Amino acid sequence: MLWKTTEYSGWGNALTATGDIARPERAATLARILDETPAPAFGNRRSYGDAALNDGGRAIDMTRLDKIIGFDPDTGVVEAEAGVTLTTLMRLFAHRGWVPAVVPGTGFATVGGAIAQDVHGKNHHAEGSFGNHVKSISLFTNGKRVTASPTRNKALFRATMGGVGQTGVILSAKLQMKPTPGTAMQVTETRLADWNDQIDALTSSTATYVVSWIDAQAKGDKMGRGILEEAELTSADAPAPDRAKSVPVNMSLFSNGLFARVFNEGYFRRVPATGRSSVKRLEEFFFPLDKIRNVNRLYGKKGFHQFQCVVPLDAIDVLEEMMHKVSRSGLASPLAVLKRMGPDRAGMMSFPMEGYTLAVDFPNRARATKLIAELERMTAQAGGRLYLAKDSLAHGDAIKAMYPDWSDWAAEVAKADPDRTMVTDMVRRLKLRG
Amino acid sequence: MQETWIILGATSSMARAFGRALAERGATVFLAGRDMEDLKGAAVDLAARGAARAEAVKFDARDPGSFQPIIDKACATEGTINAAVFVGSMPPQDEIDRDPALIEGTVIDSYTGPARFLHLLAPEMEARAGGTVVGVGSVAGDRGRIGNYVYGSAKAGFATYLAGLRNRLTRSGGHVITVKPGFVDTAMTWGIEGMFLVADPADVADDILKAVNRKKDVIYTPFFWRYIMLIIRAIPERVFKKLSV
């Protein structure tokens, strides 16, 4: 059958939708669907909230349209269908000297999804966002196929990078990969005693890949403590992979405060006080949680919300106050990261801005949603913004105020999809299309 | 070692995943099927994934004239010649009940077409004293059931053919693997009621490649289908005939 009626959700499992999903395996099948009943597309649904959902409507699962269309070993340009995952690109091309220039924290993200959210990675401060390395895209928009690039159909291109799928269905993209001397990472881990340590370390690090884990349960003197990870691509030999693990059923470990505190203490002490340096496999460094299948089940049946904001450099005090609120609440899961961001972004609705970005997971509970609302208010006050790939709770007015190019984007989207065929739950919730 | 694979029915998602696994180990792959546009795209995909060479070739189980050119092409390469058969067709049983003429096509697609192809290929494999044939059957071939016994009987015939071919090719150092997949998450099973324990095509392809490396004779994939079918085969016929499993 072409359409399957099913309930589905984003990665956070807190929001769900029911509707008809098609999962074409051939370009010809997709072309027929788009001619007859155009609908929003999704990849592996690694966005946490409702960006990929269309309750009561149709949606197209692009994950089986995952062919490599071309690869030039001399230039490192790869052309891939939207459903190709970033971990696939890494596996296929790293040993031939090329890696995707930007990858987010999960390798299951698809090329189409990475464009639709203009994702960033641990090298954002140095190398920009995913869309900064997209040479061109093929887009099904307003009934036809169109090529868009930074120089051709410019406005459409900028509305599509980070445009949460609203300009049309992303069919394929040409990506400039970056050269790598090998298939491993040289990783240095350093303990950070408190918040000031965090900010100093993130500000002064000169590494290409920098991210910091933050103990979002630590209070008092220890507030903000964590572990700085700095890394570079290396030609050193990578260790053999561990066996894949899986979380077989929903269990609420990560939503348990005591578990989080104990876990964090152990995670912090795992790195010696003097720090350590090691060689890791690319996947182990970039996608640490991907080796545990269904890791999102650790939040239990009710799911979770991830809060991720970025605030400008000069609003660091507000971020510190936010972190105090998080740690005092005792609600945060062990998965919390802090990172310095650079100014580069590829689209009108792209998340990045120069500053600091904080991401914290919370269980889907009333007290957590109240806290998140407070954190959102503080983000707005600081002149920062929220990440649409993570959001599941915000309100439209607040979001629009955070994105200065929003009205340009909405105008471009109105041209690209006049019949509103690409509207999703997120777009309805945030009234992004006006 | 240089290896050449002919993949019959290469547009199916199981075949596509198997082809990719072969490409990543540097094989030469001929992608045989009817949808040339899709196969040409798949050939480019396999080449980018590391295949020594990948080429789309026209194959139609119902047109024996399409067989020999494929075999000639594959035999023009060095090294071992191998084949993997993913073809088959499964019209819904109720459509067959209304139009029994559909039986012949089902049997040709799922059994006699690929058998005839393999029969043309076998002397070449014997001449090269090696090579592997992967024949994808189905758990449906293990016992006739009301839901799909025409397709099931074709796959049963194919399984018996593969057993005989195994017996033959062993003498010249060749090998034949019979693969019996359970439910696989493909376009064919998408949205069909009553599917359970559905396997990812990439996992099935991994299982097949492992079986190739280890020279297994008959595999079920995922493995637990061996036990499910053991139970289903153990039910006495006088009971089974009243069931609708």
Image: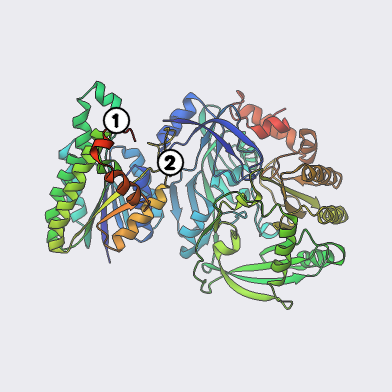
Cα–Cα gap, marks 1 and 2: 20 Å
Which comes sooner in the sequence, label 1 or label 2?
A: 1
Answer left or right for A411 relative to A8: right
- Quarter location, residue A199: bottom right
Tell me the crowding category of disc 2: few under 14, some 14 to 19, or many 20 or more residues within 10 angstroms, Cα based: few
Chain letter for mark 1, please.
B
Name above or below for residue B175 compared with residue A27: below
Which residue is denoted by mark 2 in the rendering?
B196
Q: Tell us which disc is closer to us: 1 or 2.
A: 2
Answer left or right for A4 relative to B87: right
Instruction: Tell me how many marks there are.
Output: 2
Could you say where residue B189 lies in the image, as x and y percent from the top left?
39, 37
Answer left or right for A395 relative to A350: right
Could you say where residue A100 lies in the image, as x and y percent from the top left?
55, 56
**For this rendering, which residue is in front, A160 or A339?**
A339
Question: What is the secondary structure assignment of the residue under circle 1?
Answer: loop
Name above or below for residue A32 compared with residue A26: above
Could you say where residue B11 lies in the image, as x and y percent from the top left?
34, 42
Which residue is denoted by mark 1 in the rendering?
B91
